[in-house]
Amino acid sequence: MKIFLDTADAGKIKKYAEMGMVDGVTTNPTLILKSGRKQEDATREICKLVEGPVSAEGNAERAEDIVKEGEVFASWAKNVVVKVPMTPEGLKAVRALSKKGIKTNVTLVFTPAQALLAAKAGATFVSPFVGRLDDIGEDGMAIVEEIMKIYRNYGYRTQVIVASVRSVAHVVRAAATGADIATVPSNVMDEMFAHKLTDAGIRKFHDDWEAAKKLS
Ligand code: G3P
């Protein structure tokens, strides 16, 4: 499974890119605001740090405006993907952008029916928001399982990005389901590395290493 980082923080992207963990990046207006940088500056920098797809999201609502915005984003770097909202106008824009060879990521997807429509429109990626579904008492990952099944049934090439990831369990279930990608916030990335028995084991081996040096 590919791992994308769900952040616009260049420092965090650099940290994980150096470990070879970052297959791509997703951003949204909230993450851009958090980064404290202008969208164009942040996106251009991220696209230099990461070879894989970097999703950039705009604010337009009408299809022709989404396309115009998308063309601007795509001019920033060759790995920019245009994030498009899951609306009828959004899907019209997806079709137009895909004809122009511009990659798209249909965002704010909450049902398998929406994911089916996004694939039919020719989306490169689709982003079901699992955490936000869990927040309202639904099982977000169950939606992903259904989407994967539907895409496999008909050979859709749209790739599924498990988004709104809140826990390591989400990432593990995404991989077990066979999702193409999970886009992971940096706090969850940090947790993926950790286990108390790993830390305890390192401490014990370290202590024993030092003690073994004193052997004659
Ligand atoms: O990239 C969009 C998505 O991952 C947002 O997550 O935590 O705001 O629901 P969240």
Image (cartoon, rainbow, N blue to C red):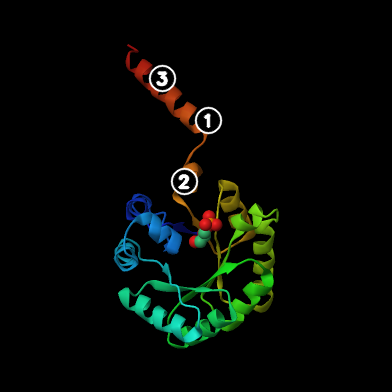
**Element on which disc 2 rests:** helix
Q: Which residue does the image show at 34% across and 49% down from the upper left?
A: 15
Q: Position of residue 186 (x, y in %)?
A: 44, 49
Q: Position of residue 105 (x, y in %)?
A: 50, 72
Give the label, 1 or 2, closer to the camera: 2
Q: Nearer the viewer, residue 74 or 66?
A: 66
Q: Which residue does the image show at 47% across and 88% down from the upper left?
A: 99
Dot 2 corresponds to which residue? 187
- Tags 1 and 3 touching, CB below 8 Å: no
Dot 3 corresponds to which residue? 208
Query: Of marks 3 and 2, which one's residue comes earlier in the chain?
Result: 2
Q: Is residue 47 above or below residue 88?
A: above
* Amino acid, disc 3: Asp
Q: Nearer the viewer, residue 136 or 10?
A: 136
Give the label, 1 or 3, closer to the camera: 1
**Element on which disc 1 rests:** helix
Q: In the figure, residue 211 lies in which quadrant?
A: top left
Horizontally, residue 67 falls left or right of residue 88, namely left
Q: Which residue does the image show at 56% across and 47% down from the upper left?
A: 168
Q: Residues within 10 Å of mark 1 (few under 14, many from 20)?
A: few
| Label 3 – label 2 distance at C-alpha | 32 Å
Query: Of marks 1 and 3, which one's residue comes earlier in the chain?
Result: 1
Dot 1 corresponds to which residue? 197
Q: Mark 1 near ligand 1 (CB under 8 Å)?
A: no
| Label 1 – label 2 distance at C-alpha | 20 Å
Q: Which residue does the image show at 67% across and 70% down from the upper left?
A: 112
Residue 27 in view of the camera: no
* Amino acid, disc 1: Leu
Q: In the figure, residue 55 lies in which quadrant?
A: bottom left
Q: Mark 2 near ligand 1 (CB under 8 Å)?
A: no
